[in-house]
Amino acid sequence: MEENCVFCKIIKGEIPSDKVYEDEEIIAFKDINPVTPIHILVVPKKHIATLLDVKKEDSYLISKIYQVINKIAKDLGIEENGFRVIANCGKDSGQEVMHIHFHLLAGKKLGTKIVG
Ligand code: 5GP
Ligand code: ZN
């Protein structure tokens, strides 16, 4: 846990969030500033600052994140229409929160370009 990390504060319950999933290792909640009708952030509870800090021992966690995304997609009924997963890393990507997270975007037909 990092003192000044907004997602660590959400994980600790110090900042409220609209949770859609939680277990001992992963939390998922609605983005405060959604860019699509469904915009969920899937976040490991372990504080890892950026994708560049992911270590071999985090493999299980990263794999589990995709299993959680799979479950959320089914729970929200978006598995048929589909969705997009984005993880930003570093300044050119516009990463704002230095605690890795995966954006799950859905609920409308997304542009064919990945960047936009
Ligand atoms: P990034 O640009 O780092 O990939 O994405 C960070 C995301 O976190 C942004 O989409 C932003 O709206 C979201 N966010 C930042 N602070 C909070 C917060 O306190 N609560 C929630 N639910 N989302 C947040
Ligand atoms: Zn953190």
Image: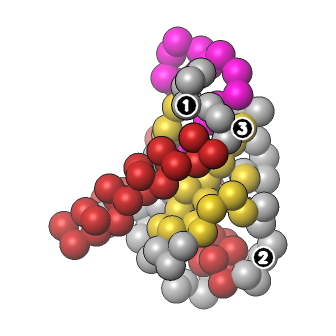
Q: Is 112 contained in the magenta span?
A: yes
**In the structure shown, which secondary structural element does the residue marked by tag 3 occupy?**
strand
Tell me how far mark 2 sits from mark 1, CA to CA: 30 Å
Residue 33 is marked as: none
The crowding category of the residue bearing disc 2, from other C-alpha atoms within 10 Å (few below 14, some 14 to 19, many at least 20), is: few
* Residue occupied by mark 1: 79
Q: Is residue 74 above or below residue 90?
A: above
Q: Is mark 2 within 8 Å of ligand 1?
A: yes
* Residue occupied by mark 3: 38
- Magenta highlight range: 102-116
Q: Give residue 71's position: percent from left, percent from top.
A: 52, 49
* Residue occupied by mark 2: 15
Query: Would residue 98 be found to the left or right of residue 37 on screen?
Result: left
Q: Give residue 18's position: percent from left, percent from top.
A: 78, 61
**Viewer-nearest of discs 2 and 3:** 3
Closer-to-camera residue (102/23) = 23
Tell me how far mark 3 sits from mark 1, CA to CA: 12 Å
